[in-house]
Amino acid sequence: MDEYNKMINGELYYSNDKKLVEFRLNAKKLCYDYNRLGPNDINKRIEILEELFKSKLDNPWIEQSFYCDYGFNISIGKNFYSNHNLVILDVARVTFGDNVFVGPNCGFYTAGHPLDYETRNSGLEYGKPINVGDNVWFGGNVVVMPNVNIGSNVVIGAGSVVTKDIPSGVVAYGNPCKVIKKID
């Protein structure tokens, strides 16, 4: 199995594989172009995002600056909004439902590294997906870690570090993030 297929299957893979480096460089170029656009270049912004995500988008708005590893592992639903400085490390799938709002300086990190330093230093890593339901609001400076599922109709408070699944219909915050109350 090649390194790309290992990566998308959540197995240890060599991140400096030539094909993966090419994919990342393409994503970095598209992010660079996106981040340099003028604020009124709305059609060009959408065009670059659709090329990056390899899908047709329905009313996306991602404020600059925006960075990702590959782009093609990101799926956003309709009416997606992100404030400034969104980072998505998408070595595994990152899926956002409809009507998701992301505050400034948020990160969604699917990448993981072996605990054993010899394996880690060899350049091997892995990724685990992140799934976000519909109608979710992330406050500023939230970090979502690999292998996390967040339900629908959720508010994640500012500054949270989400390390475990969050069910639907709740307010959750903290480090680590935990459910504080149900939303009536």
Image: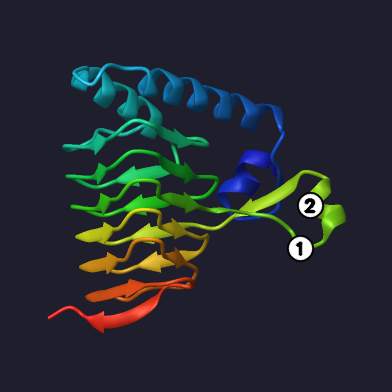
Q: Earlier in the sequence, mark 2 or mark 1?
A: 1
Q: Give the labeled residue for mark 1.
A: 115
Task: Give the residue type at disc 1.
Answer: Leu
Residue at the left extreme of this rendering: 184
Q: Do the numbered discs 2 and 1 sit on residues whose CB atoms are within 8 Å? A: yes
Q: Which residue does the image show at 23% across and 21% down from the upper left?
A: 39
Instruction: Report the front residue among 141 and 179.
Output: 141
Report x, y in % for residue 58.
18, 38
139 vs 110, left or right, is: left
Report x, y in % for residue 7.
61, 47
Q: Give the labeled residue for mark 2.
A: 120
Report x, y in % for residue 139.
30, 58
Element at label 1: loop
Toward which corner of the image does residue 35 lie, by quadrant?
top left
In this rendering, the answer to whether 60 lies above or below 151 is above
Element at label 2: helix
Q: Quadrant of the C terminus?
A: bottom left
86 vs 62, left or right, is: right
Number of marks: 2
Q: Quadrant of the N terminus?
A: top right
In this rendering, the answer to whether 50 lies above or below 148 is above
Q: Which residue does the image show at 83% across and 54% down from the upper left?
A: 119
Q: Which residue does the image show at 30% across and 58% down from the upper left?
A: 138
